[in-house]
Structure formats: C-alpha cells, structure tokens
Amino acid sequence: MSSVSTSQSRAGAQSKTGRSGVWDILILIINIAATIGMVALVWASLVYAKPATNLAGDEQLAQRIFYIHMGCNVGALIAFIVSLTGSVLYLITRNLRWDRMSQASIEIGIIIGLGTVITGSIWAKPTWNTFWTWDPRLTTATITVLVYVAYVLFRNGIDNRRTRALFGSIYALFAFLTIPLTYYSARWFRSIHPVVFSGDNADAQGGFAVGSTMMQTVAVGAIAFTLLFIALLIARWRQLSMEDQLFELREDLES
Amino acid sequence: MNNRVQEMNEDLVMPGEVAAAPETVRNAGPAAPSPSVQMRTNGGLGAYMRKVRAITRKELQAEWRAKEVFSTMTIFGILAVLVFGMAFDLRVPKSDMVAPGVLWVVLLFAGVLGLNRSFGAEVDRGSLPALLLAPMDRSAIYFGKMIANLIFMLAMLALVLPTILIIFDVNMIKTWILVALLLGVLGYVAVGTLFAAMTASVRARESMLPILLLPLMVPIFVAGVALTAAVVDGRTLGDFWRWLGVLSAYDLIFVTIAFIVFDMIWQES
C-alpha cells in the first residue's frame, strides 16, 4: 500500500516540477489580486460606502464593520463548502489530494469564521449593548468554528496518514451536516439578529437599509474574501502536499 | 426444534469463531463455495437482524458480568444531578427553570463515559480484531453496539429521572418528555457509537470523544431542552411539535450516514 502511494506521489512531484513556472505565476497573480481586494475592501467600507441613514452616532460608525463581517461570512461559507467537497471526494476516490484540500480549507475557514464571530461581537456592543447573546446566527457560527477546531485536534491525534485522512473526512462530513440543524434549532429558540438581505424579523435590533454604494461594498467584500480564501487555500494545499512528500521520502530512507 | 437449536447456536457464536458459524455453511450452498463474499452479504434481513441481536446480546452479557459501563454512567449521572442541585439551590428561585437543562447536560456527559467504553473496552481487552473477524457486515456490529448503548443509556435515565424528581422536585416522567428522550438518545448513540469506534485507536481517546461529540450534539441538546421545558411549563403538543421534528430529522439523517460510513472505518488500519 505505502509503496504504491509513494510511487504515485513521486510521479506527481515530477510532473509538478515541470509545470512549476506556470503555477508560480498563477499563484502570484492570485495573491496580488487577493491583496488588492482586501485593500479595496477596507477603502470601500471606510470611505466609499455612504453611512447608514437610519442609524446615528456609534451605531452608524459600527455599522461599517458589517462589510468585513459579511465578507468573512462568505469566505467561511465557501471554505466549509470546499471542505465538504474535498471530504466527499476523498471518501469516494481515496486520493490524498482531496484530503489535503479539505484540511487546508477547514484551517482557513476556522480563521475566517473566527473573524465573523469577532467582528460581529465588536458590532454588537454598541448596537445591542452586549458582546454576546445566544442568537441563532451567533450560536451557529460559534458552534461551527468549534466543530472544526475539534476536527483539527482529532487529526493531530491519529498517526497513520490514511486513517487520519479517512477519519477526518468522515468527521468533516458530519460537521457540515449538523450546521443547518444547529441553525434551525437555534433559530426557533429566539432571534434578534437583523436579517439584512431577505426575510423579516420583527424582533431584530440594529437593522439598516442597504443603499447602492453599500451594496457595492458588500460585493467587494464577498469578492475580496473569496480571493483571499483561494490564495490561502492554494498556499496551504501546496504546503501540505510537500509535507506529505517529505514524510514519504523520509519513510523510504528509513526503511 | 431443530430450527430453534440452530438459532440458539447462531446467537451463541462468539465473534472470531469464523469457521464455526453455522449460518455461513447454510448460505454458501453446496454448489458455489465462495465464503469470503457470501458470509458477509447473504442471508436476507432476518439473518442480518439475528447478527445485530447477537452483537447486542454479547454486549449486554459482557456488561452483565463486568458491570463496567452502566454502573459508571449511572453513578456519574446521579452525582451530577446532586452537584447541580447543590449548585443551583441557593441562587435559582424556581427549580423547574433549570431542571430541563440539568437533565440533558447530565445525559450528554454521562453518555460520553459509556460510549468511551463501547469500543475502548474492546481495544483494552484486545478483542477488537476478533470482533471485526466475525462473519457479518460491519454495519451489523454498528447496530448491535448502538442498540446496546441505547439500552444502557435508557437504563441510566430510568434512575436519573427519579433522582431529578427527588432533588429538584420536578416531575419529568411524562409521555412527551420520554418520547423526546428516546429520540434524543437514539441520535446521540447513533453518532456516538460511530465516533467511539473512530476514537478507540486514537491517542488520548478518553478526552477526544467529548470534544468531537458535544458540538455535533447541539441540535439534539437545544431541541431536547426546549421540548422538555415546554412540557414542564404545561404547554400542548402544538407548541413543541417542531422540536420532535428536529429530533426525528437528526436521527434519520445520522443513522443513515453512520450506517453508510461505518464500514469504512477499519479499511485503512
């Protein structure tokens, strides 16, 4: 088993070195695009977007964090969807490449997801007068981040590379499937989170109408965080595959 | 009579005694002896149920002799109820405000203790390879273990509920609460047995299982607490039917996926 996988990965390594020039340029372009996107997002959210007309004082100022909050949210969602895709592909094909994709996107998703929770908390203090409340969206976001932190811990406890990939993929599958159930069960508890884009929530606190410049800024945020996610994903994915190659070479040398 | 004897034999087959299983002989047939495939798949639903029952019976028998899982869980559960009772006694004006939460927290934490032993004991005794060699689909092992865990946890609840009644003076022995507990425990052991199997061979398994399991149990926990609170408050079915829906959906989804996935767990090691 191990000799087969070693020879496969060697072939992969050789073909990869052949393409490395093109790859490097592509990666460089994506990295630059992500950097520009993040700079543009900060500029758009602080300067370009007009202030929310129905808010005043601290609340109006705090509202500007929403663009980054929303961007983080989009980035984390994409990250966890990519991780689900990677896990399912691994369970079907048993190619470690997909496991590495899943792991990389989960690690990035944890960081970006934490960004969602932290920016939300900062916004909530002036608006709701509390950093924390057991709102369904807060609950779901936090539990989701915790589930994936458990994923990382779980992986670190397994020695066999393929067992690690298999158990990690199974756990990622379960983790993703509980998210909607967590959300709906928490939603029926009670909710004060404003629903900005769809639906009505009579109890919502701190909602605001979205104008055209604000909408554009939201779009910039979504694009910027998607680019950031892709750039980080590629970097981490590469790093993980190199780690695996290194490990296999070391195993070969020792045996 | 003969049939009955054979059935008993099947039930008594210990995992690992591959060659002795009478069923394999019967299923293989005289013409096509390809046991490695036929042993695991043939026999229809009835044979499958008998295998599940054999595993469950083995678990219950081992538990009856060792008294390891049930006693630990129950003692922990009762102790936890007492500790919660002391902790809340001075500060909470009405104990039925916290009792539903106490019930479900105790259920989750005590359950982890039992689930840890479900496969942990097999690893410690070195009997896991023998269990895996048993001539049956791995999912039969899963369902057998799951049903055994379900029985242990329901038995624990049968002692914890009266304890809560005594300590908190809140009667939670009501039809819909019992239904919710059954559904909640089913979902819990469905996911828990799978993860117990996965963590059994992992470093620091005792501490890993709760970390993996508890965040996935949030839907069950929220739905269970809300439903129990609604029943304790004396509301009608129309107010809490959706929580039964959440619990049933959870059970349905995760029993199915665990059933599909369980066979993969030992493929790589």
Image (cartoon, rainbow, N blue to C red):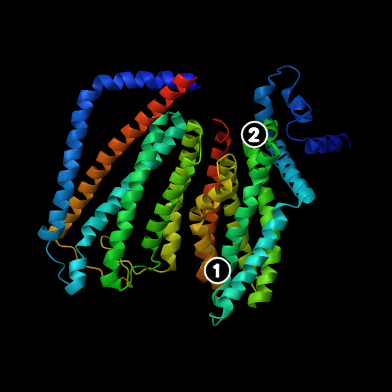
Badge 2 crowding class, 10 Å Cα cut-off, few under 14, some 14 to 19, many 20 or more, is some
Name the residue carrying label 2: B137
Out of B242 and B148, give the one closest to the viewer.
B148
Q: Secondary structure at mark 2?
A: loop
Percent position (x, y) of residue B172?
64, 71
Percent position (x, y) of residue A163?
51, 34
Question: Residue pushed farthest front?
Answer: A254
Question: Residue pushed farthest bottom?
Answer: B93
Out of B97 and A208, give the one closest to the viewer.
B97
Q: In the rendered structure, the residue with mark 2 lies on which chain? A: B
Name the residue carrying label 1: B101
Query: In this view of the protein, can residue A64 be seen by the observer?
Result: yes
Residue type at numbered disc 1 = Gly
Residue type at numbered disc 2 = Asp
Q: Secondary structure at mark 1?
A: helix
In percent of the image, x 55 and y 68: which residue is there? Answer: B101
In this rendering, the count of numbered labels is 2
In percent of the image, x 72 and y 57: which residue is there? Answer: B71
Q: In the rendered structure, the residue with mark 1 lies on which chain? A: B
Residue A95 quadrant: top left
Out of A125 and B107, give the one closest to the viewer.
A125
Percent position (x, y) of residue B169?
65, 78
In percent of the image, x 67 and y 49: which residue is there? Answer: B147
The answer to whether B57 is drawn above or below residue B98 in the figure is above
Cα–Cα gap, marks 2 and 1:
38 Å
Q: Is residue B78 left or right of residue A253?
A: right
